[in-house]
């Protein structure tokens, strides 16, 4: 099999939205001719295959004849396709032509809705993450929340796609979401107004002489937008007491992933040489490795990468590459653990299949599938220890972690001494987190301490400047992970 090399790494559905963490590459429909597939099946255990296909036809006949109301062949076959692909693992799925079209529309980078990333889990709709600055984020919806009702009507009997459609609507229209918060067991209702959601993929700020860059999704043009943000920070830092940048904080928290080529490009901006990532699948001819090209736009500045349980897939590739090369200190919480690659296979004009076809491996040869990346300096976001609550390992029928380097990680010897004094979580007096007030961001404040120590600077009072945004467009033709946007 030969694939065209458009790879994505993300996790969720975007509900005006995005769908969960995943790595995806795009195949042309010509790569999988139906006739060839039929011939392959006919020669593979043919008697058993014919028996099972006959059983499928018999069950269809029974349902059509006896179900309480008439059911079309189209609905029955679509249901069978959903089960055939969707039950393989949490990130494989079948999309009808309408669903495939919706996904292509949603990846334009702006859409009407709430700004939620959601994922199906055991027949329920779970929030992966709200998108910064959107109605969902402002309302207080949190990662891990289960959406149970839309406009006071239950969605328990709906598919993820059907639930997402309920949440979509024209900008300016009202919507009510009822959620269950597993950590507290509380049921909460949020009244919101749908908006055109513009995804700001890069945000930046200067804290003293430390540059802060937040990446929200690995969409097209991310690396160029990040490069522009870095150049802007360098110019701003000439007015700082030091006269220059002394370190970079790269914030990948709650970033569900996106395009593999962008994860590679971002990693390449900080690593001079060596492997960035490799992928290995069933067919050896499709295995690939990507190496750095000899550049480091920071000229060796200290880097701290912020992660949490919502840092998935493409985010984990960047964090894993920078960690394995000892190019950055990872501070925060263990990442999501999405270590598989999906291929988006268009099926003529009938839709598409999003199929898991490979695992990816960090430069040290490790698969993070179901494990995630462990921070060098563990720091919780809140006093609750782990605000995120669930990860890849908590999903049903996940892909196994096999192959690669199985040895224990060698402890790093380059962690700065200040790490020993960094608290694991905020104490009772720490203020509640407010996205508009960086001084309330406990992980960020600890990262600034670490960067300043690495640069040989004293630690000032908590930073208070808000992050500025750098906009980048996301072309509608860019493939995205199976995320649902609202």
Image: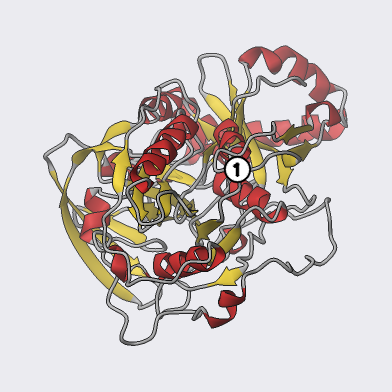
Mark count: 1
Q: Position of residue 193 (x, y in %)?
A: 14, 47
- Expressed as whole percent of the image width and height from the top left, the position of residue 84 reads 63, 39
Q: Please name the residue shown 46% across and 46% down the image.
A: 12
421 w.r.t. 262: above or below: below
**Which quadrant of the figure contains the C terminus?**
top left
- The residue under the point 78% across, 37% down is 281
Question: Which residue sits at x=67%, y=61%?
Answer: 371
User: In this orientation, which residue lies closer to the viewer: 271 or 107?
Assistant: 271
**Residue at (80, 53) in percent of width and height:** 402
Q: Which residue is mark 1?
A: 270
Image location of residue 445, percent across then percent down: 40, 68
- CA neighbours of label 1 inside 10 A, class few (<14), some (14 to 19), many (20+): many
Vertical relation: 475 (above or below) 338: above
Q: Looking at the image, can residue 59 be seen?
A: no
Q: Residue pushed farthest bottom? A: 428
172 and 460: which one is in front? 460
Residue 465: image x %, image y %?
26, 58
Asked if residue 261 shows in the view, the reply is: yes
Q: Quadrant of residue 217?
A: top left
Q: As rendered, which of 197 and 249 lies closer to the eye?
A: 249
Left or right: residue 153 compared with residue 291: left
Frontmost residue, 306 versus 359: 306
Vertical placement of residue 149 versus 235, above or below: below
- Placement of the N terminus among the 4 image quadrants: top right
Q: Quadrant of residue 30?
A: top right
The colouring scheme, among rainbow, by chain, secondary structure or one colour, is secondary structure
Query: Residue 127, located in which quarter of the rendered image?
Result: bottom left
Mark 1, secondary structure of its residue = loop
Q: Is residue 191 left or right of residue 46?
A: left
């Amino acid at each position: 099999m030969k694939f065209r090399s458009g790879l994505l790494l993300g996790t969720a559905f975007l509900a005006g939205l995005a769908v969960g963490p995943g790595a995806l590459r795009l195949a042309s429909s010509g790569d999988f001719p139906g006739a060839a597939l039929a011939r392959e099946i006919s020669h593979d255990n043919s008697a058993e295959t014919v028996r099972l296909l006959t059983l499928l036809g018999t069950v269809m006949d029974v349902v059509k004849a006896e179900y309480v109301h008439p059911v079309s062949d189209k609905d029955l076959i679509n249901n069978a396709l959903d089960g055939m692909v969707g039950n393989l693992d949490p990130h494989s799925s079948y999309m009808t032509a309408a669903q495939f079209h919706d996904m292509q529309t949603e990846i334009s980078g702006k859409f009407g809705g709430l700004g939620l990333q959601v994922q199906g889990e055991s027949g329920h709709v779970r929030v992966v993450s709200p998108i910064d600055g959107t109605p969902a984020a402002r309302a207080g919806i949190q990662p891990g929340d289960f959406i149970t009702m839309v406009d006071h009507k239950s969605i328990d009997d709906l598919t993820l796609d059907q639930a997402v459609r309920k949440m979509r609507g024209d900008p300016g229209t009202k919507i009510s979401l009822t959620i269950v918060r597993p950590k507290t067991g509380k049921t909460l209702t949020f009244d919101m107004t749908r908006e055109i959601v513009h995804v700001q993929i890069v945000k930046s700020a200067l804290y003293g002489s430390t540059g802060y860059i937040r990446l929200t999704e690995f969409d097209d043009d991310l690396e160029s937008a990040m490069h522009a943000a870095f150049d802007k920070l360098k110019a701003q830092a000439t007015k700082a007491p030091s006269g220059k940048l002394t370190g970079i904080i790269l914030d990948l928290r709650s970033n569900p992933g996106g395009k593999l080529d962008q994860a590679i490009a971002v990693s390449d901006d900080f690593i001079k040489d060596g492997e960035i990532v490799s992928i290995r699948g069933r067919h050896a001819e499709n295995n690939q490795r990507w190496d750095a090209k000899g550049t480091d736009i920071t000229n060796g500045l200290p880097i701290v990468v912020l992660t949490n349980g919502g840092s998935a897939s493409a985010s984990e590739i960047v964090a894993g590459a920078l960690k394995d090369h000892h190019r950055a200190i990872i501070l925060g919480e263990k990442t999501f653990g999405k270590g598989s690659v999906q291929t988006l296979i268009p099926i003529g004009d009938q839709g598409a299949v999003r199929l898991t076809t490979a695992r990816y491996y960090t430069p040290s040869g490790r698969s993070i599938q179901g494990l995630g990346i462990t921070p060098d300096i563990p720091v919780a976001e809140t006093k609750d220890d782990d605000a995120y609550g669930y990860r890849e390992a908590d999903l049903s029928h996940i892909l196994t972690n096999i192959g690669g380097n199985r040895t224990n990680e060698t402890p790093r010897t380059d962690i700065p001494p200040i790490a020993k004094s960094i608290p694991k979580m905020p104490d009772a007096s720490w203020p509640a987190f407010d996205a508009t007030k960086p001084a309330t961001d406990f992980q960020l404040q600890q990262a600034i301490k670490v960067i300043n120590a690495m640069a040989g600077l004293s630690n000032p009072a908590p930073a208070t400047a808000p992050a500025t945004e750098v906009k980048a467009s996301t072309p509608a033709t860019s493939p995205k992970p199976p995320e649902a946007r609202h």
